[in-house]
Image: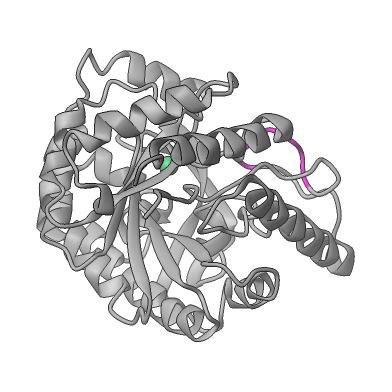
Amino acid sequence: MPFSTTIAGSLPKPSWLAEPERIFPSWRLEGGDLHDAQRDATRIAIFEQVRAGIDTVTDGEQSRKHFVHGFAERLTGVDATKRQTRGIRDDRYEALCPTVVGEVRRTHPIHVDEMRFARTLTDGPLKITIPGPMTLVDTVVDEAYGDRRALAFAFADAIADEVADLTAAGVDVVQLDEPAFNVYFAEVAAWGIEALDRALATAGCATAVHVCYGYGIPANVQWKANLGMRWDQYAHVLPLIAESRIDQVSIELAGSRVPPEVLALAGDKIVAIGVIDVATERVETADEVNATIDLARRYLPDDRILCSTNCGMAPMPREVAYAKLRALSEGALLASVGL
Ligand code: ZN
């Protein structure tokens, strides 16, 4: 079996849809025009993945401004108009976040229509990405619960309701994004994994969690520069994820200082290794991608390796992102020779 490919989640948005190369862009349109433009951008996102030969595709997150806020702000109990600045990811950077003002509930579907539409665009495997409970807790201002664990479980229940509908809509993989896992190890152990399993309890399809070092934005690049020569975050997190009920874990590997031996700590999980660095606009060669896959093969059997990007590509120039999709696919093909 050749190595299978996917992406972490997001792709750049066209400039006619939203401000380009931003993590939190403004939409260019509104109302029905915005809806139509999001659909067209989704068509392009899936077309470009399929054209590049990516096996499991996403909608490129073309219908949401931001990977967390797009979900959080549509929950009851979260006031999107009451936005406050707070330090997130252990104060790595400041962000304008919505406020939790009451009991968090998911009273209507959030990304389900988007996925129903995406489902009509491809017969291949389709993945949806949703922020995980801990990352949601870490990206809102809580004025209602006063307890991160309790709020995480409320978010987990809201996600579980959404996941049930997404499964019914024909999604093949549900991935929860938990960049916060790389920051709060004690909380991951105390309640993070439990919240993850609770959020995915309704999934009638494959499940995944993405844990990364973030988009290639200056604050993250600076943070990484201060993490030393060996990034040991995954050494804390992977053994905990190994105990979860999740099927896959998506991590960063290309161009990083992640010691590859941490891959051996992932239990029996399928590991989506990042073979594309999103912190640089330089496009990898197929040989470089192949070399990163080779590195992973020292610690994982071939049938537990999935090839992916380190993180989302939303803030990149479009043509760079599309070229990286092709590099990902070509590198995986090269690594598959003889399999
Ligand atoms: Zn990421």
> Where does residue 57 sit, x and y in percent of width and height?
56, 58
Compared across the picture, whether 281 is left or right of 107 comes to: right
Q: Is residue 22 magenta?
A: yes
Q: Quarter containing ligand 1?
A: top left
Position of residue 188 relative to residue 158, above or below, is: above
Along the line of sight, the residue nearer the viewer: 225 or 126? 126
Residue 265: quadrant of the picture: top left
Q: Is residue 200 left or right of residue 53?
A: left
Question: Which residue is pictured at 52% across the width and 42% down the height?
Answer: 312
The x and y percentages for residue 101 are 44, 66
Coloration of the structure image? one colour
Please report the bounds of the magenta region as a residue range.
Answer: 18-24
Name, please, the residue furthest toward the front.
Answer: 338
Whether the magenta-drawn stretch holds residue 66 is answered as: no
Residue 147 seen: no
Where is residue 228? Give x, y as percent.
23, 14
Kindly indicate the quadrant of the structure image that contains residue 292. top left
Question: Which secondary structure type mostly characterizes the magenta part of the structure?
Answer: loop
Image quarter in which the N terminus is found: bottom left
Q: Is residue 17 above or below residue 63?
A: above
